[in-house]
Image (tube, coloured by chain):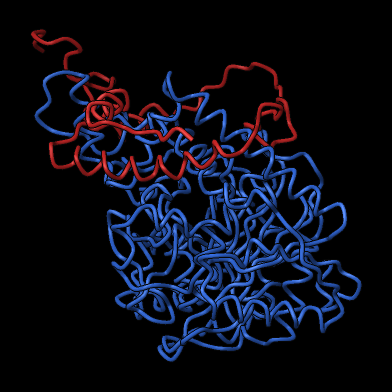
């Protein structure tokens, strides 16, 4: 059974994909912990599954269809009240690219 | 007035409301008093909403229509269910101050029935954990011993009911998060069949596994609450269109002729010997009541934890992408650009357990790992379901322990994530297969409650409750009270 290992660099790469940043201490800690957990995951390779179909959901339903009717919930202000920063009735965020000032 | 919920079940509270011996506002005030009396010990609530609850109670008293059994009765909601205008945090820093603009379907259903939510119960952050210790806000304690964990992730809901603050509460269960805290606190908790209860407005952790269900002190109360929250919802594409039966219909106390299977794997390595003995004694009692009991095998049980942690973390990593600091909740300061805002907000806003699961899920779904992990786990899920199907060809129910141990000490396990994950071995398969699972108190080990888990066929909660009720009525264990009961 091939044991899955995960390196510190791979953990840093996955963190980037997940939009998370770790300092050096955290990176070491997560590399060890994720390695331990992946060892548990590796036990699955003991099971022969070439003829088994995967199950992604146990719902009996395919889809519930409804008429596509436009509906104004009139909740714009409520939504904006939850935004950390708003301006001119819009949610305000920092510049998308470096160097573009406000 | 004061109210001691150890002396009244929902049926008796309902009768008192109908007969005007008590009003909704009396009950609501008394419940809020209960919380202020004991929450310094239990720490079960992230927030309470007294003004809103009292206003609702007043309207109910004015309307004076107590035809629904839950009308006028207070409850607690796990803080991952959206409540309109009332802070809902998922016990995460990243949602601090967030006030949803709509109610979850279960909240809407209970509100329409006249039940009164008095507060939002503590939980593991985004329901990730088994001890309520990953909450950003506080550490809930076990109702029987405040030096022990309440279990999790719905630890606040369980402690609030077991500690007598409220007569019932809702929790959510993705891998055991209702059943295990119910077991640790000696009360009744049900994870319904997947699709029985709408997930709309429940903060998604793993969408193919999550279900909402009730915590109560008795089985009948549990069935009464399930009646109130079940049913098809256009807003949840996985909610079932099946008719909702009366879940109290089979509560006769009789289990004669019921065929019960006991998987040998549920008493394997890692199960505390005293817990196993208690649960075997409970099963013997069901047999004495007239059920037939046989040992069976669920051979893929030992792969459940690995399959679950891959599937759950994959779904969670996708679901939690929405928390980016843009539209609601916490936003990090001093950011250079939008990318920086996402990364800083998520890194400062999520706790370690949430980050661990996002990392596992992102890894399991990544290009090189998808087939070996995510797809492999989905195939193992099929095998686990087939194990259950085979047993259910010949049996009505499967029973065993809810958790491998009783509640452990605060801080004892939290630094060992692999040990925490492995402790979910007995509850996880039920979620992967979408089955209903109940935990009822099976007695005590060294003063701490132990749960008997009763697993049924899909949409057969009635038979699950039938066995739970028969055992409860025969054992009378629900009459045992923790010390905190003396406070009321």
Asked where in the image residue B472 lies, by quadrant, the reply is: bottom right
- Foreground residue among B279 and A87: B279
Chain B, colour shown: blue
Q: Is residue B1 visible?
A: no
Q: Is residue B319 above or below residue B94?
A: above
- Foreground residue among B438 and B292: B292
Spot occupied by residue B471 in the image (x, y as percentages of width and height): 73, 79
Q: Is residue B349 visible?
A: yes
Q: What residue is rendered at 49% in x and 74% in y?
A: B185
Spot occupied by residue B264 in the image (x, y as percentages of width and height): 68, 64
Q: Which quadrant: the C terminus of chain B?
A: bottom left
Furthest residue to the right?
A: B257
Q: What residue is rendered at 41% in x and 35% in y?
A: A3
Chain A, colour shown: red
Judge from the rendering whether residue A22 lies leftward or rightward of residue B253; answer left or right.
left
Q: Is residue B430 above or below residue A11?
A: below
**Total residue callouts:** 0
Q: What residue is rendered at 47% in x and 39% in y?
A: A42
Spot occupied by residue B19 in the image (x, y as percentages of width and height): 69, 80
Judge from the rendering whether residue B481 lies leftward or rightward of residue A50; answer left or right.
left
Spot occupied by residue B395 in the image (x, y as percentages of width and height): 84, 60
């Amino acid at each position: 059974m091939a044991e899955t290992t995960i390196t510190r660099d791979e953990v840093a790469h996955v963190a980037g994909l997940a939009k998370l940043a770790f300092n050096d201490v955290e990176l070491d800690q997560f590399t060890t912990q994720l390695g331990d957990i992946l060892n548990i995951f590796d036990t699955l390779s003991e099971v022969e599954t070439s003829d088994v179909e995967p199950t992604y959901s146990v719902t009996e339903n395919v889809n519930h269809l409804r008429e596509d009717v436009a509906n104004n919930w009139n909740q714009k202000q409520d939504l904006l009240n939850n935004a950390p920063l708003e301006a001119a009735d819009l949610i305000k965020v920092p510049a998308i690219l470096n160097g573009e000032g406000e | 007035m004061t109210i001691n919920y150890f002396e009244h079940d929902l049926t008796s509270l309902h009768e008192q409301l109908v007969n005007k011996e008590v009003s909704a506002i009396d009950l609501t005030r008394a419940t809020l008093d209960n919380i202020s009396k004991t929450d310094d010990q239990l720490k079960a609530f992230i927030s309470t909403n007294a003004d809103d609850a009292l206003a609702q109670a007043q309207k109910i008293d004015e309307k004076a229509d107590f035809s629904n059994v839950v009308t006028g009765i207070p409850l607690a909601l796990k803080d991952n269910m959206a409540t309109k205008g009332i802070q809902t945090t998922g016990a995460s820093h990243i949602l601090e101050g967030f006030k949803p603009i709509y109610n979850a379907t279960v909240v809407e259903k209970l509100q329409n029935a006249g039940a009164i939510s008095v507060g939002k119960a503590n939980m593991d952050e985004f329901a990730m954990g088994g001890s309520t210790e990953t909450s950003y806000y506080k550490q809930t304690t076990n109702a029987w011993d405040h030096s022990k964990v309440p279990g999790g992730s719905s630890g606040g809901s369980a402690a609030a009911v077991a500690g007598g603050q409220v007569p019932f509460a809702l929790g959510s269960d993705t891998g055991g998060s209702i059943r295990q805290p119910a077991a640790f606190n000696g009360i009744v908790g049900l994870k319904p069949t997947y699709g029985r209860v709408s997930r709309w407005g429940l903060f998604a952790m793993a969408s193919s596994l999550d279900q909402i269900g009730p915590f109560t002190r008795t089985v009948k109360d549990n069935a009464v609450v399930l009646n109130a929250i079940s049913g098809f919802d256009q807003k949840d594409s996985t909610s079932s269109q099946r008719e909702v039966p009366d879940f109290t219909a089979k509560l006769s106390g009789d289990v004669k002729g019921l065929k019960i299977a006991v998987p040998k794997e549920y008493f394997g390595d890692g199960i505390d010997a005293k817990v196993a003995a208690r649960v075997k004694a409970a099963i013997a009692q069901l047999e004495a009541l007239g059920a037939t009991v046989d040992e069976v095998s669920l051979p893929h049980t030992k792969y459940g934890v690995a399959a679950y942690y891959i599937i759950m973390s994959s779904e969670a990593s996708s679901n939690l992408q929405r928390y980016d600091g843009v539209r609601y909740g916490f936003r990090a300061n001093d950011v250079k650009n939008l990318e920086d805002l996402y990364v800083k907000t998520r890194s400062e806003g999520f706790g370690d357990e949430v980050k661990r699961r996002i990392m596992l899920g992102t890894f399991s779904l990544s290009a090189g790992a998808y087939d070996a992990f995510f797809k492999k786990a989905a195939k193992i899920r099929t095998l686990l379901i087939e194990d259950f199907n085979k047993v259910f060809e010949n049996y009505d129910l499967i029973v065993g322990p809810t958790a491998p141990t009783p509640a452990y000490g605060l801080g004892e396990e939290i630094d060992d994530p692999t040990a925490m994950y492995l402790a979910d071995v007995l509850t996880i398969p039920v979620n992967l297969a979408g089955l209903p699972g109940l935990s009822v108190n099976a007695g005590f080990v060294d003063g701490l409650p132990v749960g008997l888990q009763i697993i049924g066929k899909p949409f057969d909660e009635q038979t699950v409750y039938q066995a739970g009720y028969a055992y409860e009525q025969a054992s009378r264990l629900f009459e045992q009270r923790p010390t905190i009961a003396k406070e009321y």
